[in-house]
Each structure stands twice: as structure tokens, then as C-alpha cells.
Amino acid sequence: MNEKQRLEGQQVQTANPSDKKSEKDYSKYFEAVYTPPSLKEAKKRGKEEVAYHKDFDIPQEFHGMGNGRKFYIRTYGCQMNEHDTEVMAGIFLGLGYEPTDTVEDANVILLNTCAIRENAENKVFGELGHLKHLKKEKPDLLLGVCGCMSQEESVVNKILKTYNQVDIIFGTHNIHRLPNILHEAYMSKEMVVEVWSKEGDVIENLPKVRQGNIKAWVNIMYGCDKFCTYCIVPYTRGKERSRRPEDIIQEVRQLAAQGYQEITLLGQNVNAYGKDFEDIQYGLGDLMDEIRKIDIPRIRFTTSHPRDFDDQLIEVLAKGGNLVEHIHLPVQSGSNEVLKIMARKYTREHYLELIRKIKAAVPGATFTTDIIVGYPNETDEQFEETLSLYREVGYEAAYTFIYSPREGTPAAKMQDNVPMEVKKERLQRLNALVNELSAEAMKKYQDQIVEVLVEGESKNNPDVLAGYTRKNKLVNFIGPKSAIGKMVKVKVTDAKTWSLNGEMIEELNAVEVE
Ligand code: 5AD
Ligand code: SF4
């Protein structure tokens, strides 16, 4: 019986750190009552079929559990986590809880965590420290940790050992079990731990409270099978599981009907969409070709892997319309040797050819990327190749990172002869280039008219509105509040390194936008 089957009896496990007598007793105790998550288990890719559940409902016995109570969720990491938070918020509302923006007011606080780099994890441990005093003031407060960090056994063990202010830990495959987990936490004085190492099924119809009514995220697949040697995601998010096309299309249609202006299709590796279907041949190109026909002004997708980016998708993107001409295509490194050690399974030449094909098919296509510097043993020459590739592609922006070893991944076991000082210096040099090319790209917009989807007031000045162009450029401009949520034309008066300033000249009807 595997862990999932064992838990299918809807039993939530608990562990009580206060029973700890000595370090040894402590670990014995946990062995007896609690199975920690296992990265080794999470690495396995079995042939077992994914079941699709279309009938999610909050069990009757939990209705009203949140009456008179408030929840607060703090989200770290990527859009996938942001979207998971929307689902958890939907479940909380279904249980009768009310949302709050202040931790002091909350009866349940969840930290939806990210495991991608060490500093992401450190932020969470810091926050758990800050929240400890609230537990003292409000003993019936529930403090929970969920998201990617909960999938790591080292993290769960650390929390059990040193953060006994935590009441709940649950994993990325256990989100739909939130009602049961909360119930158990109220019933028991012990820490509730429910982390399935193996991915669960695909569950449709989960409730969602979306963060706004202008842009929406739509999951198209879960998990990742790429196993790049540095990356924890295939372990924390499980194997690739695609949602059925009809479910995705229905969700996008509903969002269009509700007036949403922009959809981002989400997955850890969206280009692998559909590869797991056994009964149909259906990929991301097919899906995009359907979705582009839906009456919604903008469609994006993220994140792409260059290896699976096929010609069919390029052909569909070339049809334009609501498919925007901005592509985020993480390259990670410009050196073939480094790409090989990263197990990216493409070469610099293959990547550049892909960019060439997209540029040829999609007029005006722009690119952004992710880059890791200071990979174990990366040489100066190899780093220079990343810089030269950056110029050759002509990226308009990039997320840049110093390599961070993640326990359980192959790269974490590699010897590394690159001192931190050198890594930092490489990051600075790369960032200088990123800024230079971004400023250059922005300059081209000076005095031009751009189409902006207005998202709201600018962060720094409520008299200024802010929104993004199809190519994802931030535009700040003076305009009437009535423009919020609409597509408008703005004349650019000032091009900065990372944003454009302008004046609104015209409001467009969303339907007219091509
Ligand atoms: N160290 C540094 N950066 C990483 N990324 C993923 N794993 C690591 C790691 N161990 C970066 C990659 C990825 C982005 C989401 O985070 O660039 O594309
Ligand atoms: Fe972080 Fe990756 Fe998890 Fe997103 S999927 S929260 S980036 S570890």
C-alpha cells in the first residue's frame, strides 16, 4: 500500500513535538506515528494512470467550520503558488471563513512556500519566527505551512524540531484536503502533518477566489518530468499531469464571459502539455489554437521549456490575434558544457535556432528569460558565452539568479570550485547587461502609441494609472479611473529602464482589439 492509498481512508496524521524527550526519542516517536515526505519517493515516475475527479465538493460535515473566523494566506514564489492560494482562499470561503489582510486579525495563517532557492526558504523560516508571538497571544490561532517547502523532508523535520508554533503542514498534492486538515487541527492538540510525496489525481471544480477581475491564471498542467539537475520542482510538484482540453477551454470561456481581459495558461513546463494523454494526440499548439478563438483580448502562457517548443506551436502563435508576441523562454546558460551538466537537453545552437524560427514566424516577437550564474565549476569562458547569447537573442528582460544547491537534486552533490565572490561578480555583470538591453528596448517606444491593459492605480502614486502592453511592458500614465480594467491607447512620453511613462489618448472597446 502506498502513502496515498493509506491516506485515502481520509485519515489525517498528527505528530506531537511536545512528546519529545531526547533527540533520539523524538525521532523514534515520529517514525512511529508519522511518515515524512520523501524526495526519493517523489522522484519516481510510475506508469499509474492519473484519475480525473470532476466532482469536488466541500464535505457537508465541514460546512460552517469557518463561521466567525478569518484566514490570511501569505504567498511566496511563482504564479503556480499564487494560483494555489486562490484555490485555498476559495476553499476557506466555502467553509465559511472570511479573508483578512492582517495577520493579527486572522484565526488561521497559512504560509504558501517556495523551495526554489535557499533564500526563498530562509524568508519563510524568518516569518515563522516573527509569527511566534501571535501564537502566544492567541493560543487558538492555527499557523500552517504549505506549498513546495512542505514537500521536503528536511524542512518538515526542521519545523517539527524547532518551530513548534506551527500547527499544520500540508503538501502541494494535498490542497483539496484542506477542510479535513483544518478539522483535524481543531480536534487535536498535535501538529497535523499531511504531505503526499506522490502526486495525486487531477481535481477539477476546485473553488477559486481570483485576485482580481482583469487578469486570470488557468492551470493547464501540473508537475514536471524534466529533472534539470539543479531543480527541486520535479520533486515538489510531481510528475506531469495535463488537464483535459475541454475542462481548460470551458474555464477560459467562463472567464471571458465574466469580462476577464487576459489569461495566462500556467504549468511548470507548458510545452509538455498533453504528452501524458494516452487516448488523444493533443499538444500545446492544439490547445492554443482552440483558445485563441475565445473572445478574450490577451492570452499568455508560462513557463516554456525550449526542448519541447515545437513547430506546430510556432505556427499557431503566428496567427497572432489574442496570442501575444512576448515569450518567456528560460535558457539558464549560453554554454553547451553547462547546459549539458544542467541536463537541459538542448544546445546553444538549438536554442538560437528556435528563437530564429519564432522571430521569423511571429513579427515583432520579444523574449525574456531566466538565467543561473555560478553553476558548479562554471568557468569565465562559459559565463562569457551566456553574456554573448544574451546579446545575440536581444532579450528585453531576464530573471537572473546565483545557483543555489537544493538538497536531493544531483547538482547539490557536485563539487564546486567557483567562489561566492566570483558568482556575485558574474551576477552583477549579467545584470548590467540586462539593464542595458532593457533600456535600449524601452527607448524604441519613445513617442510611440502603445495598447495598455489598465490594471489599477500605480503602486507609488494613486493619481497615476498602471498597466501592461501585450509585450509585458509596464506603463504608468495619467488617465481617468474609469479606464481601469479596460484596454486603452497611451502615448509614451518618457522611456525609462524598466517602465514607460505616458498620456492616455483613447479608450478602446475590448472587442475591437486585434
Ligand atoms: N538555483 C538558482 N536558481 C534556480 N532556478 C531553479 N532552480 C534554481 C537553483 N537551484 C531558477 C531557474 C528557473 C527559475 C524559476 O528559477 O532559472 O527557471
Ligand atoms: Fe517555487 Fe517552483 Fe514551487 Fe513555484 S513550483 S513555488 S518556483 S519551488
Image (spheres, rainbow, N blue to C red):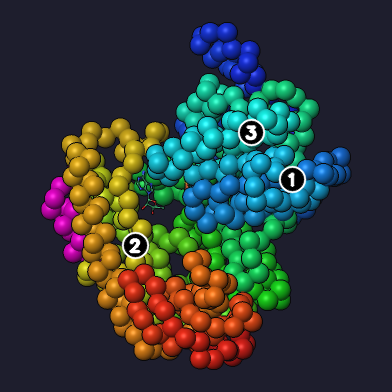
Q: Earlier in the sequence, mark 3 or mark 2?
A: 3
Task: Please tell me which residue is depicted at 36% across the width and 69% down the height of the picture.
Answer: 498
Task: Please tell me which residue is depicted at 51% across the width and 48% down the height of the picture.
Answer: 76
| Residue 380 counted in the magenta span | yes
Q: Is residue 401 visible?
A: yes
Depth check, front residue: 116 or 46: 116
Task: Please tell me which residue is depicted at 40% across the width and 66% down the height of the picture.
Answer: 328
Residue 429 image-quadrant placement = bottom left
Q: Which residues are magenta?
A: 377-390
Residue contact at pointers 3 and 2, CB within 8 angstroms:
no
Looking at the rendered structure, the kind of residue marked 1 is Lys
Depth check, front residue: 238 or 262: 262
Q: Which mark is residue 398?
A: 2
Image location (x, y in percent) of residue 38:
51, 30
Q: Which mark is residue 134?
A: 3
Give the side of residue 269 with respect to residue 65, left or right.
left
Distance between mark 3 and mark 1 Cα atoms:
14 Å
Q: Nearer the viewer, mark 1 or mark 2?
A: 1
Q: Earlier in the sequence, mark 1 or mark 2?
A: 1
Kindly tell me whether mark 1's CB lies below 8 Å from ligand 2: no
Residue 428 image-quadrant placement = bottom left
Q: Which mark is residue 70?
A: 1
Mark 3 secondary-structure assignment:
helix
